[in-house]
Amino acid sequence: MDPIIQHAQALTRRHFFQRGTLGLGTAALASLLPARLQAAPAALPSSSGLPGLPHFAPKAKRAIYLFMAGAPSQMDMFDYKPEMADWYDKDLPESVRMGQRLTTMTSGQERFPLAPSKYSFQQYGKNGTWISELLPYHGRMVDDIAIVKSLYTEAINHDPAITYICTGNQLPGRPSLGAWLSYGLGAMNENLPAFVVITASWTGPQEAQALYNRLWGSGFLASKHQGVALRSQGDPVLFLSNPAGVDATTRRRMLDSLARMNQQTFEQFGDPETQARITQYEMAFRMQTSVPELTDLSDEPQHVLDMYGPDVQKQGSFAASCLLARRMAERDVRFVQIFHRGWDQHKNIGGDLPNQCKDIDQPCWALIQDLKQRGMLEDTLVIWGGEFGRTIYCQGELTPDNYGRDHHPKCFTVWLAGGGVKPGIVYGKTDEFSYNITENPVHIHDLNATILHCLGIDHTRLNFNFQGLDVRLTGVEDQRPVRDILM
């Protein structure tokens, strides 16, 4: 009998719940099982991706996503609105708001007083792009990046919004962008995962919005496609080293025996997750050697360390994470995503936003310059952004020197660089309140379609049949890559 049919017939209640927890379990087990140096690896299922992909010649081989979790304030950083100076403490006109849904944090306010940015802006680059004083290093690289000021989303709260932009759906359970790339394109380095996640430390208040494994999960795809998270403190991966009393030869024998048992299980039930489990164990084998070498920065020249700034020596900092991302790009990791938390500034923008910007400003510039100097920027796509924007009106007490901003899904700013993106351009416009988009709206599905396009993927053709539907990252609406920002 066909093993797949046999598997379907043998799908007991216990087996069903086992499958439901495999995503988390195999990720944990993968980091528990290190490997012997120079051992011959067991046979692995192909990591070359789907037949026929890429769909066309890609501009980018890999991508690095710098995700500012919590939603940066676009009008304090990129979306310059000098005319708002005359609107200080005036009420937001209803003709601008147009009955837009509000969060429970400000829906009860008696007023919506306007809070112009307290920060000065300066023009940079060939096109005179306006950049906040908080981002002087971004000012130095405006000719290398494409700034998109007209992103929008339907989600208004953090959890659904960040789940939406990372997985294409506001409800949990869908594969993340990195998992789709791993599924479609496969891995380029057999010693490192195709998809790596880093959660960097941050300087702002530590009571930041939580991040969940589902943001880099594989959803209904095989669990081998989920992101492997590197820790910001201690060993990069838990239990990477052999425990006391267990040598490499013993560990290798254990892995080989386990592989044989898993193969027998696969032959009996035909469950593809069993093959994914074998793959992850063997990846853990290789990572015992590759990860310590990857995270050892002692071979980096001093001038490179200086470029990333003083925080590069702090394990887990955003600067150190950006340097690690460059090292992973060198080693052909397909997709690296760095999450930097602390951007949810409902109050005290005057105190917190400068610290957040200082965390990321120089390292972002250094990453772009580092890739550029190595000739890697042309085939490495870099994306920077959050899950939505912030309101022009103040949440809480308003003073000339300090204010807070609530969530705003109707417009926000991202930037992209390298990997087929036109450098030195600004795309999209918002009204004078940085509230509504007036030119070239870009939905978050359009952004993801653009990212896939740079990597040679037609987003309408990358799908997976699940529950009778051909599911894709970008949904079923008429989304399309933003070709005006592409070379």
Image: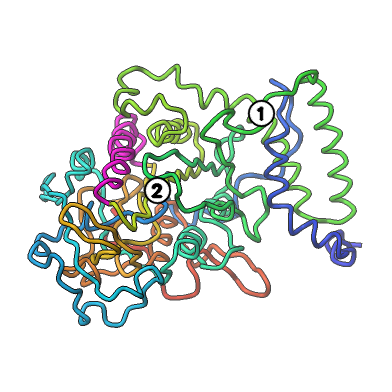
Q: What stretch of residues is rendered in magenta?
A: 349-378
Residue 354, percent across and down? 26, 43
Residue 310, percent across and down? 33, 25
- Give the side of residue 408 with respect to residue 221, left or right: left
Image quadrant of residue 191? top right
**Crowdedness near tag 2: few (<14), some (14–19) or many (≥20) residues, C-alpha within 10 Å:** many
Residue at 24% over, 74% down: 111
Mark seen at residue 240: 1
Residue at 22% over, 58% down: 75
Name the foreground residue: 454 vs 137: 137
Of helix, strand and loop, which one carries label 1?
loop
Image quadrant of residue 450? bottom left
Of helix, strand and loop, which one carries label 2?
loop
Mark seen at residue 342: 2
Could you tell me the amino acid type at mark 2? Answer: Gly
User: Comparing marks 2 and 1, which lies closer to the viewer?
Assistant: 2
Image quadrant of residue 193? top right
Residue 63 visible in the picture: no
Q: Is residue 361 magenta?
A: yes
Residue 8, percent across and down? 84, 66
Sequence-wise first label, 2 or 1: 1
**Crowdedness near tag 1: few (<14), some (14–19) or many (≥20) residues, C-alpha within 10 Å:** many
Residue at 82% over, 22% down: 250
Up-down relation of residue 58 to residue 463 (above or below): above
Could you tell me the amino acid type at mark 1? Answer: Leu
Residue 158 visible in the picture: yes
Up-down relation of residue 351 to residue 257 (above or below): below
Report the magenta stretch's main SS.
Answer: helix
Residue 184, percent across and down? 56, 54
